[in-house]
Image (cartoon, rainbow, N blue to C red):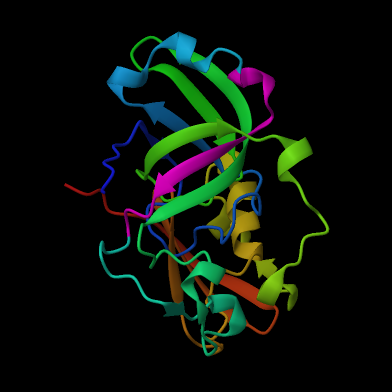
Amino acid sequence: MQYEMKPIAHIRTDFPEKFGVPRQSGLVDDAIATVVMEPEYRQEEAFRGLSGFSRIWLIWVFSGSPEGQWSPTVRPPRLGGNERMGVFASRSPFRPNRIGLSCVRLREVRMEPELGPVLVVSGVDIMDGTPILDIKPYLPDSEAYPDAARGFTARRTDYHVTVEFPRDLLDRIPEEKRETLMEVLRENPRPAYQTDPDRVYGMAFARWNVKFRVDGKTLSVIDVEERRKER
């Protein structure tokens, strides 16, 4: 038996590409986004009571990953990309059903004249334009188990880096977005298995392309340029 699902909303974020998206929800709390409902789900009554919750679950689709290309084992980037784990022990997008799950902070449920109820959320780890399949409230009493075993993720390494961002380049970013960008960079978006200090990485953030190098525990921004608008 097959089940058909269709998006109820799409999310608008500052991450137009997969590279640079925070690896988990909540890592960059200032990463603000808006969830815009599809026209048939813009009934205000469907959101009655939601504003009483501080966090919600977003169930979404890995729309940036190829459909039907799942793998029984994957190489988690945080294990250096050289060790395989079962796909069901990971949060890899290369799964039989490309479903993602994110716990985000609900900042506001606001009504807009043309869009109806719009959710303002933060701490997102989702690409811009991603289809949302469902929205559910987060219940801390029944969904938080701080003593649960962490599996292979217990082998934690501090991947945070010090960011060197020349003032003249930082000034190209609007002030209200600077701290979010800094948080993303501090999380070191470079894959753990790439260690060449001379390699230049380009990360899309909002309407800019940020170029940087990583040498040990220091990430140095070398250029910020406005991205070309897609036609």
Q: Is 67 situated left or right of 135 in this image? A: left
Q: Residue at x 47, y 72 (%)?
A: 87
Specify whether residue 175 is in view.
no
Specify whether residue 138 is in view.
yes
Q: How many marks?
A: 0
- Residue 201 part of the magenta segment: no
Q: Residue at x 41, y 63 (%)?
A: 93
Q: Is 106 situated left or right of 196 in this image? A: right
Residue 130: image location, x then y, percent? 37, 45
Residue 2 lies, with reference to residue 122, above or below; the image says below
Residue 199: image location, x then y, percent? 47, 85
Quadrant for residue 112, please give it: top left
Work out which residue is located at the far left of the displayed protein and give it.
231
Work out which residue is located at the far front of the displayed protein and give it.
1
Residue 204: image location, x then y, percent? 41, 58
Residue 191 lies, with reference to residue 143, above or below; the image says below
Give the camera-side residue of 161 and 121.
121
Give the camera-side residue of 67 and 224.
67
Q: Is 132 situated left or right of 168 in this image? A: left
Give the camera-side residue of 45 and 198.
45
Q: Residue at x 50, y 77 (%)?
A: 86
- Magenta stretch, residue numbers: 50-64
Residue 79: image location, x then y, percent? 60, 82
Q: Residue at x 45, y 74 (%)?
A: 201
